[in-house]
Image: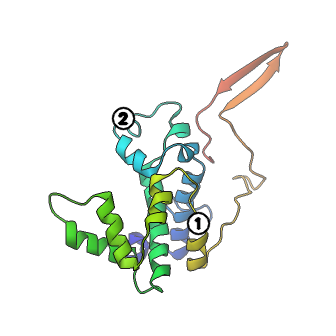
Amino acid sequence: MTVRRAGLSTRPEYLGTDTPPSPGSLSTVISALQSTPGRLTQSAAQSSYDAWIKLYRPDENSVNSTISYYTKGAVIGWLLDATVRHATGDSKSLDDVMRLAFARYSGAQGYTPEEFESVAAEVAGKSLRPFFARAVESTSELDYGEALEWFGLRFRPDTAAPNGGPAKAFLGIETRQDGGVCWSQRFPRHPRL
């Protein structure tokens, strides 16, 4: 968002509606989150807590069992911004939440998750407990509905492969049968996943 506000990217580049989508665009970050199976097994809060033992020491199963709190955090921030804007009729935003949190808690101690949630609720003028419980503390799918509606956006399926044809599913292995024996070879994660 900072790059967009500074005029260093266009709206299509920020949203990821350019072709191909810009790295770091909103659609790229949401796609990365939604294509990571670990989002259903590890919450953003747990990912933050476990970062030093899991995120920074990945193994072959990490994509299935963990989520990056950087990726999910960016999406949660966007959703929180929409939630605050909707609750206040667009008179307040995540910017106001961050400014108030900084004014109250900057310094050596910082703030607890509960204190940040309290600041967000104060700015929104209502409890945001259900939002934080679902988006930050649980492994439930994120609800994009309110944010998409508030910002006048919609998801469009990515049905085309880079060569213009339909996208193909890829499991990270190739198999072949040779003389009654099934051979398989493991490949690095496919770039479209």
Residue 7 visible to an observer of this rendering: no
**Which residue in the structure is indicated by mark 2?**
53
52, 41: nearer the viewer: 41
Q: Residue at x 44, y 34 (%)?
A: 58
23, 101: nearer the viewer: 101
In the picture as drawn, the residue positioned furthest to the left comes out as 108
Disc 2 to disc 1, how far (Cα)? Answer: 30 Å
Rate crowding at label 1 as few (under 14), some (14 to 19) or many (20 or more) other CA atoms within 10 Å.
some
Rate crowding at label 2 as few (under 14), some (14 to 19) or many (20 or more) other CA atoms within 10 Å.
few
Q: Residue at x 72, y 52 (%)?
A: 161
Residue 165 visible to an observer of this rendering: yes
Residue type at the position of mark 2: Ile
Using the image, determine if residue 142 lies above or below residue 38.
Answer: below
Residue type at the position of mark 1: Tyr
Q: Residue at x 63, y 48 (%)?
A: 192
75, 10: nearer the viewer: 75
Quarter of the view holding residue 160 = bottom right
Q: Position of residue 106 (x, y in %)?
A: 19, 65
Q: Secondary structure at mark 1?
A: loop
- Image disc number at residue 28: none
**Which residue in the structure is indicated by mark 1?**
144
Using the image, determine if residue 112 lies above or below residue 2.
Answer: above
The first of marks 2 and 1 along the sequence is 2
Q: Secondary structure at mark 2?
A: loop
Instruction: Report the side of 67 relative to 100 (left or right).
Output: right
Q: Residue at x 44, y 76 (%)?
A: 84
Q: Position of residue 138 (x, y in %)?
A: 50, 52
In the picture as drawn, the residue positioned furthest to the right comes out as 180
